[in-house]
Structure formats: structure tokens, C-alpha cells
Amino acid sequence: MTKPLHLISYTLHDQSHSVQVESDREQLTPYQARFYLSALHTFEWPSEFSDVQVTRVLQSKKGSVTPTYRVQR
């Protein structure tokens, strides 16, 4: 079984970024995403990230991914 995919959108140093991640959880909160981002950007603290939004990405039957556009806050 594949792990759930999440799209994390965030701002760091006034630059917009996004990253797609696999998680063991069905839902990923922005709070949890901040710790993932601080591991990705090893020299940044979780508080350095702003406008963190998490969107669950669903796999379609053809194998492409489709975001659900449900933002968790």
C-alpha cells in the first residue's frame, strides 16, 4: 500500500516554496509540516517558516496525482 502524499506550501525568507512528501499519516498538520521542513532545511528553525499550508494529494487511477484542495490549518 502506498503512503499518503501531501503537498506542503510555505514561505521561507520571503520566498515561496512547495514540496511533496509521503507520510505515514492520513492527515498532516501545518505544525507537523514545520518539523519536516526544518529537517529538509537543516539550518532553519520551525518558527522560520510562515504561511505553511498542507494539502492532501490523491492518486488517480491512471497514476497521476491530483490535489484535493482541502487545506488543513
Image (cartoon, helix red, strand yellow):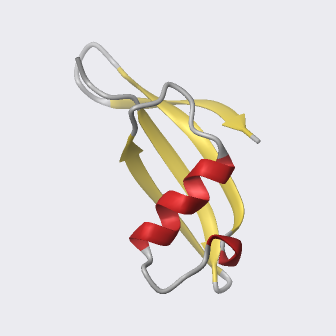
The picture quadrant where one finds residue 19 is bottom left
**In this orientation, which residue lies closer to the viewer: 49 or 10?**
49
User: Percent position (x, y) of residue 53?
Assistant: 66, 50
Q: Residue at x 25, y 24 (%)?
A: 2
Compared with 33, 39 (above or below) is below
On the rendered image, what quadrant is the N terminus found in? top left
Q: Residue at x 60, y 60 (%)?
A: 34
**Total numbered labels placed on residues in the image:** 0
**In this orientation, which residue lies closer to the viewer: 44 or 58?**
44
The picture quadrant where one finds residue 55 is top right
On the rendered image, what quadrant is the C terminus found in? top right
Compared with 51, 5 (above or below) is above
Compared with 46, 18 (above or below) is above
User: Percent position (x, y) of residue 49?
Assistant: 66, 71
User: Percent position (x, y) of residue 50?
Assistant: 72, 69
Residue with the most extreme top position: 61
User: Percent position (x, y) of residue 24?
Assistant: 39, 32
Q: Which residue is drawn at 42% across and 80% down?
A: 42
